[in-house]
Image (spheres, coloured by chain):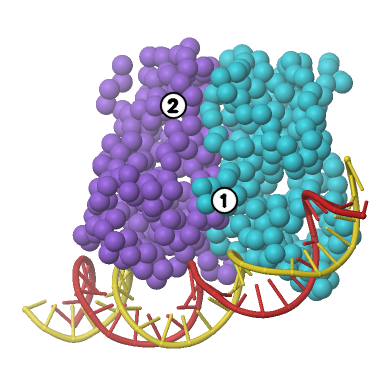
Chain colours: A purple, B cyan, C red, D yellow
Amino acid sequence: VVESSRLMPFVAKLERHVALSEADRDALLSLPCHEVNVDAGTCLPREGDRAASCTVVLSGFACTHKLLADGNRQILAIYMKGDAVDLHNALSVVADVSVLALTALEVAVIPAQALQELLDTRPQIARALWVETLVDASIQREWTINVGRRDSRTRVAHLLCELGLRQEAAGVAARAKYVLPLTQEQLADATAMTAVHVNRVLQALTREGVIDRDKRMLTMASWDSMADVGQFSPNYLQPVQKGASAQAS
Amino acid sequence: VVESSRLMPFVAKLERHVALSEADRDALLSLPCHEVNVDAGTCLPREGDRAASCTVVLSGFACTHKLLADGNRQILAIYMKGDAVDLHNALSVVADVSVLALTALEVAVIPAQALQELLDTRPQIARALWVETLVDASIQREWTINVGRRDSRTRVAHLLCELGLRQEAAGVAARAKYVLPLTQEQLADATAMTAVHVNRVLQALTREGVIDRDKRMLTMASWDSMADVGQFSPNYLQPVQKGASAQAS
DNA sequence: CGGTCGTTTGATTACGATCAAACGAAGTGG
DNA sequence: CCACTTCGTTTGATCGTAATCAAACGACCG
């Protein structure tokens, strides 16, 4: 049994959605990988023609974003401990986005080929990774709804709820009290607003006592009231039905 | 060789992204399925505790959408010939969305379990289906950008470009001339606008000669000018790198 | 022939963007 | 240790895009 693997948080996250056999788990934990540190504000190198690899967050926060022709920027996803930022590389699928370290970041880099080899022999691992991309897709849908159909206040609150719940699930903070991994400008890029307006929304929420801010530390008066403001229902983060495909092979 | 299977368009789409062996292809084409017709404007039945199944569009157009508490609606994806609308069911993953027939619709319904059984024995099929969800995810990202960061004019034009290109790829129309499968109200729900404003944008585009409309028939003056207005670059629809995982097993 | 649905037109409103500038904290170099 | 820069946050004033409200119009259908 591989106990000390740096991939433990990643495998733990997979197992939240799909049951794995001992053998499958060990195969994942024994994957070759090397650790890399990235400074806050730095983009992860885009693989050109070099061998592709998959990147798993060990600590810190990252995001994917895209810069438009007119200079506008949209942050498309946020990643934290245990999240794979570029699982598509395992299938040679390209995502036309940049990966940015929001904070100081530790990542594990796995050669895509090593992952690919597991797919042929271990169908349950293939399922687990596929489910992972389905969860990401579910979150992406919710983001489309967020920027498309919610007003600024609800939008910001919704994102703050998601960040809280995901950090709690990842074991890095409590859902109702955590250090914001984004600047207000980055919050704006994630919610399709301007930094000025994000600031005003945060001030309004503070004034009304829904949240409390001390530097970057965010404390919600109560989770329920925050979820209410953000029209937040957590189903989309846990889209796996218990039973069925979750059997270990 | 199964030649007359109704799943042919679906398998053809899979093979646009991943190479399949004869055996894999036949296994897919021989999947048990039954055909269902759905009237325009009707929601596909949500599976409760019944056996889950996967739905493939044979003809017509469908979409997934979500209704918010305040009555607002967001269309999240549009499906056409060859598209699977609920591939997540193969892994017992739930998507908290409704599926709506935009036009009269023919679909093939495949028992999820039959698909699941293929995953264990045919890793290349698992890959192909996974890639399919990655393509959908790529489109979803683009939609987030569209509603988040583009102005109404660009937004509408971008959607019209996507619809054209995808219909051409699916072999149901030319990219620059097709029958709009959406009402203006539905276009509004897809682009996070109001029907009134969609109408004004369409009129403006018509006035400027970028598009021509006759009933629902849409004709672009030229694809390039339309792509220009919509800031449309088609990469996100074809995110698969040639080579690598595309080997037939 | 009324009835419904989708489209079109017009008038008004408002939410959030934009522009501009000041402020505080953290980091850097002289 | 103190100027000085930089980055993130905050405040204020104004503007503009698209929403909202309201109503008419055309096509299709029973």
Whether B241 is drawn above or below D2: the answer is above
- The reply to whether the C-beta atoms of the residues labelled 1 and 2 are less than 8 Å apart is no
Task: Name the one closer to the observer, C26 or A47.
Answer: C26
Q: Say which amino acid is labelled 2.
A: His
Whether B134 is drawn above or below A125: the answer is below
Q: Say which amino acid is labelled 1.
A: Gly
Place residue B117 in its image quadrant: top right
Task: Name the one closer to the observer, B31 or B201.
Answer: B201
Circle 2 residue: A17
Percent position of residue A81, x then y: 34, 40
Chain that bears disc 1: B
Q: Residues within 10 Å of mark 1 (few under 14, many from 20)?
A: few
Task: Name the one closer to the observer, B247 or B126.
Answer: B126
Is B72 left or right of B32, judged from the image as shown? left
Q: CA distance from mark 1 to mark 2?
A: 32 Å
Circle 1 residue: B71
Whether A134 is drawn above or below B52: the answer is below
Chain that bears disc 2: A
Could you tell me which residue is drawn at 44 percent across and 26 percent down?
A: A17
Could you tell me which residue is drawn at 85 percent across and 42 percent down?
A: B172
Percent position of residue A36, x then y: 34, 44
Place residue A200 in its image quadrant: bottom left
Is A246 left or right of B213, judged from the image as shown? left
Whether A39 is drawn above or below A28: the answer is below
Whether labels 1 and 2 belong to a single chain: the reply is no
